[in-house]
Structures are given as C-alpha cells and as structure tokens.
Image: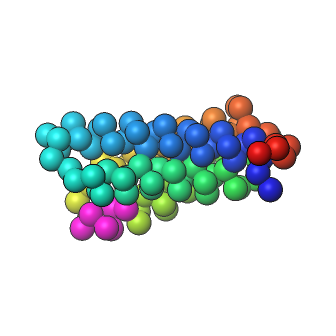
C-alpha cells in the first residue's frame, strides 16, 4: 500500500540524492563517472524507501534516531562499494536519514493515497 508518508520520503530521498551528486562532483573536482553518481543518488532513494516503509510514530525523537540508523545502514553499502574511501558520503547518510525521517513525520501520515 502506498502512503503519503512513503511518497514524501521517496521524494525527499530523491531530492537529497541530487544534493549528493552535486556534493560528490564538487569534492572530486567533477571527476566522478555517471554510474558512480547514479549509485549515490539511488542510495539516497533507498534510504527514503526504507524510512517510508517504516511505520510512522508520534514520538519525533524515536523516529529521528531510527532515521539516523537507517541512513547509516543503507549508506554503509555504498561506502563499502567505494573501497571504504567516501567517509563523507557515509556520514552524510546519517544526516539525510534524519532529514528524510523528519519530512515523513512532518508531511507524511499513514493514510493510503490513490496513485
């Protein structure tokens, strides 16, 4: 079932993925390949998916911690694929998990939506 929360979290993940692409390009001097950048964006989208599928909660503190945990767990897969070289990408995953979880908390909900 698709919920507003899931859609908000996917959108937030997709948008933050674009921010990651820009950041990765700036940090690398615009030397990253397209497949690397796509994988980075996709990783952020997966964070949004994982958070969006988790149930909403009235406790903001708990969901923000959950967002941080999901962010680092999902980002760790990308970190390993870089040969453990992109520590910034790993750490930003924690921050993005928190941001995505906050967006889901603030603008989401648990009611189904028609697609």
Q: Determine the residue positioned at 62% across, 43% down.
A: 9
| Residue range of the region highlighted in magenta in the rendering | 78-83
**Residue 106 versus residue 45 in the image, above or below:** above
Q: Residue at x 53, y 44 (%)?
A: 13
Question: Position of 36 compared to 55: left or right?
Answer: left
Percent position (x, y) of residue 42? 45, 54
Residue 95 seen: no
Q: Residue furthest front?
A: 115
Q: Farthest right residue?
A: 111
Which image quarter is the N terminus in?
bottom right
Residue pictured at 63% horizontal, 35% vertical: 103
Q: Nearer the viewer, residue 62 or 73?
A: 73
Query: Looking at the figure, which quarter contains the C terminus?
Result: top right
Find residue 84 and report its horizontal and vertical position in percent.
26, 64
> In this orientation, does residue 29 appear?
yes
- Whether the magenta-drawn stretch holds residue 110 is answered as no
Which residue ends up furthest to the top in the rendered image? 106
* Prevailing secondary structure of the magenta residues: helix
């Amino acid at each position: 079932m698709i919920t507003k929360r899931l859609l908000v979290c996917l959108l937030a993940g997709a948008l933050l993925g674009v921010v990651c692409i820009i950041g990765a390009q700036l940090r690398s001097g615009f030397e990253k390949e397209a497949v690397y950048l796509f994988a980075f964006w996709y990783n952020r989208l997966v964070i949004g998916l994982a958070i969006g599928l988790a149930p909403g909660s009235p406790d903001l503190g708990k969901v923000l911690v959950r967002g941080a945990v999901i962010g680092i767990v999902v980002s760790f897969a990308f970190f390993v694929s870089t040969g453990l070289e992109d520590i910034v990408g790993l750490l930003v995953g924690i921050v993005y998990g928190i941001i995505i979880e906050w967006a889901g908390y603030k603008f989401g909900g648990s009611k189904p939506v028609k697609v």
